[in-house]
Image (cartoon, helix red, strand yellow):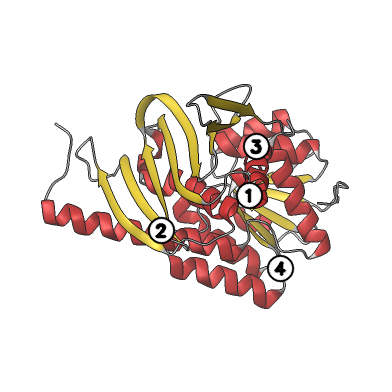
Amino acid sequence: MNSKVAKSNIALIGCGNWGRNLARNLYNLGVLKAIGDADPKIIDWVKKTYEGIKVSVNYTDIISDPEIKGIIIATPTHTHYSLARLALMAGKHVYVEKPLARGYLQAQELNYLASVKGLTLMVGHLLLYHPAVNRLRELIFKGELGDIRFLNSDRRNFNQKQRRDNNVIWDLAPHDISMMSYILGLEPQGIVNACGWSTNGDGVIDVAHLDINFPGDIPAHIHNSWIDPQKQVLLTVNGSKKTAVLNDNRQEDKLVLYSIEDDGTVTVEPYTYSQEEPLTLECKHFLHCIETGEAPRSDGASGYQVVKILEEAEQKMHIENHKAQTLKFV
């Protein structure tokens, strides 16, 4: 990636908890020109925090601004499609936080629209820009792990705020699916099994298990949960030679390779990687793609594939839940 950061004018739509991280990075990169948010309290916060930045509670004012070259969308999931479509129709390059849309037909339309208009469409699959994930991908491609036999991703936290417009797989599984596809260099073939539970009995799935198959008969399992007070962000990749463990909860030695010697002893190899913030790298990549026309690492096509898998998983869960009539924890 070109280390030089282009100075395109960028607008951020949505400045909530995650949007504030984006605002910080864009501001530090010298490209943040406008922020739009429907909450007047957030607008007041933006005015106090970032002097000289254009603000508005009207998203169309931001999108129609001729000085803005790119739009970053960090709003609730159900708004991603409509806002991204509006921005693309206005001729803006677009970066949408994951997931790209709430249905694969919507994702497909956005991808097609960006292609026809010659615009960058990038999805916020953050882990594709994580230095430790990229180091793991490099090791897999070099054959350090041997033949990949199984992947398991365990992503859990304590989060009740997402219930309004999501379920747990649409919130967390995009990270797992996009990361697995990226480190393997393969698109998933489909969902083998999917089950989920609504522990509050409100119909919103907050615990889920997904089984995915990748080409070459490589199985993968994903566990997502919103009800665990002890956060877990753990990826295990089992190979014929070595097993990699990427534990993003650790401050140090996030990426470790394990192997069993002939005498039964276990060899542990920690691997180093860049310490640059993944979100900073992701923002730089968006700017680079705008200026060069290069396809983003997390482009619209990969965003579409993730949404397609999520929709398939959700359908399987609904079928299984219907068969069992009600699946809940006691």
x and y, in percent, of residue 60 in the image? 62, 58
Residue located farthest toward the bottom when viewing the structure as drawn:
116
In the rendered image, the vertical position of residue 124 relative to residue 16, given as above or below: below
Question: Label 3 vs label 2: CA separation?
Answer: 24 Å
Report helix, strand or loop for mark 1: loop
Q: What amino acid is at disc 1? A: Gly
Circles 3 and 1 in contact, beta carbons < 8 Å: no
Q: Which residue is mark 3?
A: 132
Q: What amino acid is at disc 4? A: Leu
Instruction: Please state if 96 lies on the left or on the right of 92 as rendered.
Output: left
Circles 4 and 2 in contact, beta carbons < 8 Å: no
Q: Which residue is mark 4?
A: 119
- Classify 10 Å Cα crowding around label 4: few (below 14), some (14-19), many (20 and above): many
| Viewer-side label of 2, 1 | 1
Q: Is tag 3's residue or tag 2's residue first in the polypeptide sequence?
A: 3
Report helix, strand or loop for mark 2: strand
Quarter-of-image position of residue 181: bottom right
- Classify 10 Å Cα crowding around label 2: few (below 14), some (14-19), many (20 and above): some
x and y, in percent, of residue 238 in the image? 48, 42
Q: Is tag 4's residue or tag 1's residue first in the polypeptide sequence?
A: 4
Circles 4 and 3 in contact, beta carbons < 8 Å: no
Quarter-of-image position of residue 133: top right
Instruction: Please state if 102 lies on the left or on the right of 201 as rendered.
Output: right
Q: Is tag 3's residue or tag 1's residue first in the polypeptide sequence?
A: 3
Q: Is tag 4's residue or tag 2's residue first in the polypeptide sequence?
A: 4
The residue drawn where x is 71% and y is 30% is 272
| Viewer-side label of 3, 1 | 1
Q: How many marks?
A: 4
| Viewer-side label of 4, 2 | 2
Q: What amino acid is at disc 3? A: Ala
Q: Which residue is mark 2?
A: 213
Between 278 and 162, the one nearer to me in the picture: 278
